[in-house]
Amino acid sequence: MPDPRFFNRTGPFRVRDIAAWTGGVVVGSCDLDITISDLAHLSKATSADLCYLAGAEYAEVAANSKCGVCLTTEELAEKAPPNAIVVVVDDPQGAFAVAAEVFYPNQPEVITDAKITVGGAFIDKTATLAGDVVVESGAVVGPGVIIGSRSRIGPGATIGAGVVIGQDCDIGSQVSLIACLLGDRIVIHPGACVGQDGFGFVFDSVAGRHRKVPQLGRVIIDDDVEIGANTTIDRGSLEDTKIGGGCRIDNQVQIGHNVSLGPRCVVVSQVGISGSCKIGSDVVLAGQVGLADHVTIGPKAQVAAKSGVMRDIAPGEAVMGYPAKPIRAFWREVAALGRLVSRKKSS
């Protein structure tokens, strides 16, 4: 369920309403006036939730799901959760996006009910700040925000509604925090953005345009993390984006929605991590590495600079190249290519 601190839900809505919005057809006979209260991932749904099934690879998850209504295709209908009301649609993810826009029409906001305070900051009257928190000039602290002892909010930073910041944190100038929960001793350098929309779109063939998929997850950052200047960390779509304790993330890194980064990872400048990647503990991603979506990288793996990772990487494996391959294989190929070029020049 999306966190109510950040997302305001409407509804509940009847099954017949959901079918009407999505252009779906209900399979079999059922009570179309049953109400659905929320949206959820298949693995976490209850009988009051709406989910979608868009691929056969999720059939095992669906078989154990308790969701109340499932949007899916005619081909996948038999793989839908056993006790769910099935609504057949052409594009399950697109239909889910339509429903999500109705359930959650508004995105997280940074609106304060406060006049300028001492020191030139704007702090909402419902925010809770420890007595020794420092908020610099021009910063905005939204409603329901909680900030722990000895933390500092830099000039011009924006702290969105409901955000939680732990103790001994240093939030740099012009940082933007939305829909996120931060632990203790976190350093975020100037210009970083955490918790903005993930890059989620589906193509609506009827309307002939890309339709935005509402991003209803959060960003969870554990203790002792440092995040570099102008880095961006997107919030999750339905699940959370997670940054493990002790991670070191350099400047100008992009971390997509639903990414899970294990403890003590090192992510060097200009790395791009696509959505739903799962990265184990103590992984090193060198400069300008790119990860395709849904890639899994095992603990203590290392990826050399400028590599493009298109497949899963085993624990402890060192890879290099585009596409990335075991580093010894990469250098053997480079050496072989060099020998071929030398022979061609000598002939």
Image (tube, grey):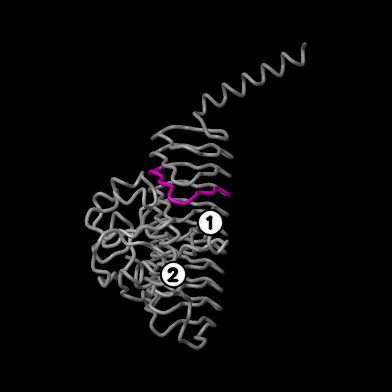
Outermost residue, top side: 347
Question: Which residue is at a point 52% across and 28% down the rendered structure image?
Answer: 327
Q: Nearer the viewer, residue 142 or 74?
A: 74
- Asked if residue 214 is among those painted magenta in the image, a careful observer would answer no
Q: Nearer the viewer, residue 244 or 233?
A: 233
The number of discs equals 2
Disc 1 residue type?
A: Gly
- Which disc number belongs to residue 252? none
Q: Is residue 174 above or below residue 315?
A: below
* Residue 8 position in % (x across, y down): 38, 75
Mark toward the viewer: 2 or 1: 2
Q: Is residue 325 above or below residue 308?
A: above
CA distance for labels 2 and 1: 33 Å
* Residue 126 position in % (x across, y down): 38, 83
What residue did someone put label 2 on? Answer: 101
Specify which label sits upstream in the sequence, 2 or 1: 2
Q: Nearer the viewer, residue 329 or 38?
A: 38
Disc 2 residue type?
A: Glu
What residue did someone put label 1 on? Answer: 228
Q: Nearer the viewer, residue 26 or 48?
A: 26
Q: Quadrant of the N terminus?
A: bottom left
Question: Which residue is at a point 57% across and 33% down the rendered structure image?
Answer: 321
**Secondary structure under badge 1?**
loop
* Image: magenta residue range: 270-282
**Secondary structure under badge 2?**
helix
Question: Which residue is at a point 33% across and 76% down the rendered structure image?
Answer: 11
